[in-house]
Image (cartoon, rainbow, N blue to C red):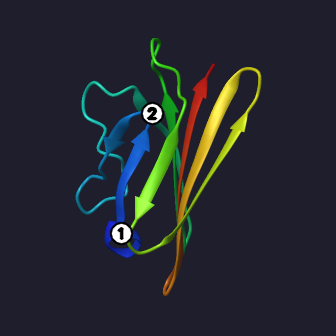
Amino acid sequence: MNNALFGIEQITINKTSYPLMENSLFIDKGKNSPLVLVGNSYSSNSVGLDYAWMSQTEKLTFAGITSKKGQVSVSQTKTSTTVTYILTVSTTSPKAKMTYTISAHL
C-alpha cells in the first residue's frame, strides 16, 4: 500500500504541516523535526505507523490529517503523563485503513 490508495494530503501537528514521502506512507518530517518513528504494523488491508513527539520545548497540542480519497477520523486520549492522537484514513473500495499514532509525554 502507498499513498495513491489513501490520497493523504498532509498531517498537521501543532501548527506545522507535514507532507508524506513520495510513493510512501511515512511522514516527511525533515531533519529537525521532533517526530521519531517508533513502531509499525501491517496486515493485508491495514498499515499503522507509530510516532513519538520528542520535543523538549514544544508540547503536543494538536494533530490532524486531510485526505482527498478516504474518510478521516481523529481521536485524542490524555492521561496525567501522556497525550496520544490517533489519525485514521479509511477507504471502502478497496477496503483499507491507514493509522498514524502520535504520542508525547506531558
Foreground: 6 or 67? 67
Disc number at residue 42?
A: none
Secondary structure at badge 2 equals loop
Q: Position of residue 104 (x, y in %)?
A: 58, 27
Going by the numbered disc 1, the residue's amino acid type is: Gly
Label 2: which residue? 14
Disc number at residue 7?
A: 1
- Residue 18 higher or lower than 78, as above or below: below
- Residue 54 higher or lower than 22, as above or below: above
Q: Residue at x 33, y 42 (%)?
A: 17
Going by the numbered disc 2, the residue's amino acid type is: Asn
Residue contact between numbered discs 1 and 2, judged by CB atoms under 8 Å: no
Q: Residue at x 36, y 69 (%)?
A: 7
Q: Residue furthest top?
A: 57
Q: Is residue 18 left or right of residue 14?
A: left
Mark-to-mark CA distance, 1 and 2: 21 Å
Q: Residue at x 41, y 70 (%)?
A: 6
Q: Residue at x 31, y 38 (%)?
A: 29
Nearest-to-viewer mark from 1 and 2: 2
Foreground: 69 or 49? 69
Q: Is residue 1 left or right of residue 40?
A: left
Q: Quadrant of the N terminus?
A: bottom left
Q: Position of residue 5 (x, y in %)?
A: 38, 75
Foreground: 75 or 42? 75
**Within-10-Å neighbours for mark 2: few <14, some 14–19, many 20+:** few
Secondary structure at badge 1 equals loop
**Within-10-Å neighbours for mark 1: few <14, some 14–19, many 20+:** some
